[in-house]
Amino acid sequence: MPDIDDLTTRMRDFSIQRDWEQFHDPKSLMLALVGEVGELAELFQWLPAEKAAALAQEEPLRRRAGEEMSDVLLYLVRLADVLGIDLAEAAAAKMSSSEDRFHPDEYQGAAPVKE
């Protein structure tokens, strides 16, 4: 399984080989990312919430969801590269922060509420 560094390098090389770096400014990548999230959401939009996970195990939804999630991941990886953000490091820091903020004894079975 490739790691984030491998995907970053592969996406960068893919873009360079096609001279697409000119189109990969942060705004354009963000809009592409949002578009792909929308395509993923569309797959689940009208599914009953209680059946969505089970239905996603069946074809063709399983394959389509995987394709759209891959598009989301790849655009996110490319955006992080363009912005010079180490995505793995940022995600690890965010997880540490969340673990500190949302202690299991305080949030067990309860969603955080914004105040």
Image (cartoon, rainbow, N blue to C red):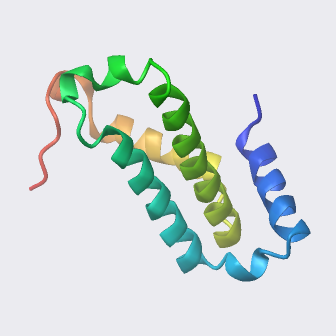
61 sits to left or right of 48 = right
In which quadrant of the rendered view does residue 109 lie? top left
Of residue 105 and residue 36, the one placed in the foreground of this image is 36
Picture layout, residue 61 above or below residue 80: above
Res. 92 visible in picture: no
Query: Is residue 86 at all visible to an observer of this figure?
Result: yes
**x and y percent of residue 90 in the render?**
56, 52
Above or below — where is 55 with respect to 78?
above
User: Residue 96, image x and y in percent?
Assistant: 45, 39
Instruction: Classify 24 as above or below 70.
Output: below
Name, please, the residue furthest toward the right: 17
For residue 34, side relative to residue 109 (left or right): right
Residue ranking furthest to the front: 60
Give the percent coordinates (x, y) of residue 99: 37, 35
**43, 98: nearer the viewer:** 43
Which quarter of the rendered picture does the N terminus lie within?
top right
In the drawing, does residue 15 fall left or right of residue 81? right
User: Which of the pair 51/27 is nearer the observer?
Assistant: 51
Q: Residue placed at 51% from the left, 61% from the top? A: 33
Residue at 19% x, 29% y: name it: 48
Q: How many marks?
A: 0
* Side (left or right) of 96 relative to 6: left
Viewer-nearest residue: 46 or 14: 46
Residue located 23% across and 39% down the image: 46
Q: Write down the quadrant of residue 47 in the picture.
A: top left
Query: In which quadrant is the C terminus drawn?
Result: bottom left
